[in-house]
Each structure stands twice: as structure tokens, then as C-alpha cells.
Amino acid sequence: MLRMRGRSRRGALALVACALVLTAPAAGEEKKEAPSPEKEGKLPSGEPPDMNTWYAQVLAHSPVGINVTHFWSKDSKLRAETVIAGRRIVTIVDETTYYAYDLLVRTGIAVQRAPKAIAQDKDRPRPFGNELHALLRQGAEPIGPESLGGQDVDVYQITDERGRRKLWVTQDERRLPLRVFAYQRVSGTGMNTDYLNWQRGLPILNAFFIPEPGVDIATLSYEEYIQKQAKRQPLGPVPVLYSDLLHGF
């Protein structure tokens, strides 16, 4: 198996680990009932189905480096591409399967998604960019409006044993994230994440959410994945970056 090596890989993965603080509940944390997307104004009723495609570029930067990810979605389908230590990492999520592969060497894994994660698809306005919903579940509270890049935004924040998370979202009904700050108490590091160039209504074909021909994909059931993970057995050349879409929250 080809593996990403060296300090650059560890730094890039540290960016990912810091980002996951936003969506992963703390151990033993009592989960709060999240407001429905329509109540939050994130999924306006009566909009045509062909408008439910999204794109955003995400720039994450911290003391260990910079990482750029491109996200596309159509209904509950997701495609994300990021470069980690020179490797082009692709994540595809469809109605039943989570794919993660290295397009440079054309190897990866396909894992059956947990029933819990599949059931939660209907509550997501899109598979990515749902930081407001995640932070509200964790107990975040509004701290007032601000101006970000000349745009009026609403700001939410939570501070707990894990650290501090702060989120800037648009004031319109879509409540799109524009900036996220996450400080990890354990590591003493912080990361800023900026969402750029939000686009909606792109004509994305379903074939865009199918792995490219010639990629060697190892298929695992969800139970097999959990067992291998518990035993620390090899699980493909790239990490699972969006665990809520595989396991649920």
C-alpha cells in the first residue's frame, strides 16, 4: 500500500483533524435536539429540485500549513477534492456508499454507510457547509452581528472542554458559513477556515459522483470497516475526512 509520508503529510492531516472538531461530538456529550433545516431557514420550501446543487471552495489555514478543498453536491451526493502532501484525495458520497481514494495512484476504499448517516441525509440542506447546524447541536449561541469583508453576518460561538469554535454565517435564509475558527485546547493550536465562491444551481450530472474508471477500490461493509478500525488494520491509502457522512452524528 502506498502511504503519504513525512512532515508535510502530518501537517496537512493536522489541518483535517482540527477541522473535525467542528462536527464531532465530545465523548459523553449529550446531544441536543437540533432545529430542523427549514426552521433555521437553510432549506427554503417550494424551491425547484434543480437548484439543489452546490459548490464552494474552502481554504483552511493554520500554523502547520494551508489546505484547499473543492466541494460539489447534488441532493445528498457529495464530491470533495483536496491535495494533501501532493496527493489528490477524492471523497465521493452517494446514497449508500462512502468512497475515499488517491487519484494519483488510483487506489482507495468504498465503505457501506451506516444506516444512521443515511437516515440523516434528509435533514441536511446539503452534505457540506453545515457548520451552523453542527455547532447548534453542540450548544453554540449567537454573539451578535458583525461585518465580514463588507458583508453583514451573524456570529455564533461555543467554548467547552475541547476549546472554542466560532462561526460567521450569512444573514439570509440559507445561513451559509463564510468563516470558521476552531481552537483546540489539547494541542493549543487554532485554524481558520474560509468558504469562498459559493455557487448554486450548477448543471452537475450524476456521473460526477461515480469514481473514475480504473481506480482500484476495495469494498468494505460498515461492520468490516469498524472491526478493522478497532484493530488498527490498514484501511486504504487515504483517511475518512467527513466522518459524519459515514457514521452519522
Image: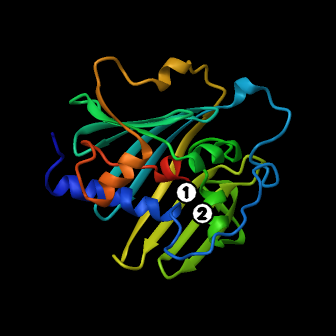
The percent position of residue 154, horizontal first and vertical second, equals 70, 62
Residue named by callout 2: 167
Residue type for callout 2: Leu
The percent position of residue 167, horizontal first and vertical second, equals 60, 63
Vertical arrangement, residue 105 with respect to residue 171, above or below: above
Q: Residue at x 22, y 58 (%)?
A: 10
Quadrant in which the N terminus is drawn: top left
Residue 129 visible in the current orientation? no
Q: How far apart are labels 2 and 1 at the CA level?
A: 6 Å
Quadrant in which the C terminus is drawn: bottom right
* The quadrant where residue 44 appears: top right
Of residues 102 and 7, which is closer to you in this image? Answer: 102
| Badge 2 or badge 1: first in the primary sequence | 2
Residue named by callout 1: 179
Residue 100 visible in the current orientation? yes
The percent position of residue 52, horizontal first and vertical second, equals 68, 31
